[in-house]
Image (cartoon, rainbow, N blue to C red):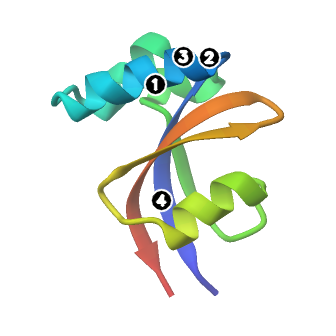
Amino acid sequence: MPRAKARHILVDSPEACQQLLSHLQSGADFAATAKSYSQCATARHGGDLGNFSPGQMGDEIDQLVFDGEIGTVLGPVQTKYGYHLVLVTERTG
């Protein structure tokens, strides 16, 4: 079964998400940005979602994590929680 490790940043608007994406594309550190701006409890750990399998994070996040490029900031993607940027750091299977 596939598994992945990823980080994410959760914000409440597409505009905030786009601003953070620009910030990250300019060279900002993803974990530090997550600690400063993410509205998820994972922020204190740099947005670390840990190691997980498909079906554990919801369809929208799964699609990015299991189909997207490793090491590239992916998103924005909207879920019922808000708007996310995702960085896949590892994937197996």
Q: Which residue is at 47% across, 13% downward?
A: 37
Label 4 sits on residue: 5
Q: Earlier in the sequence, mark 3 or mark 2?
A: 3
Q: How would you rate the neighbour count of disc 3 (Cα within 10 Å): few for under 14, some for 14-19, many for 20 or more?
A: few
Residues marked 3 and 4 touching at CB (< 8 Å)? no
Q: Distance between the residues labelled 3 and 1?
A: 5 Å
Q: Distance between the residues labelled 1 and 4?
A: 23 Å
Q: How far apart are marks 1 and 2 (CA)?
A: 15 Å
Q: In this view, does 42 lie above or below 50?
A: above
Label 2 sits on residue: 39
- Left or right position of 69 against 84: left
Label 1 sits on residue: 18
Mark closer to the observer (2, 4): 2
Label 3 sits on residue: 15
Q: Distance between the residues labelled 2 and 4?
A: 20 Å
Q: Which residue is at 62% across, 16% downward?
A: 39
Q: Distance between the residues labelled 3 and 4?
A: 26 Å
Q: Which residue lies furthest to the left in this view?
A: 27
Horizontal and vertical percent position of residue 34: 43, 24
- Left or right position of 89 against 75: left
Mark closer to the observer (1, 2): 1
Q: In this view, does 89 lie above or below 49?
A: below
Residues marked 2 and 4 touching at CB (< 8 Å)? no
- Left or right position of 21 against 93: left
Residues marked 3 and 1 touching at CB (< 8 Å)? yes
As shown in the figure, which amino acid type bears the numbered disc 3? Answer: Glu
Q: Which of marks 2 and 4 is nearer the N terminus?
A: 4
Give SS at disc 2: loop
As shown in the figure, which amino acid type bears the numbered disc 1? Answer: Gln
Mark closer to the observer (1, 4): 1
Give SS at disc 4: strand
Give SS at disc 3: helix
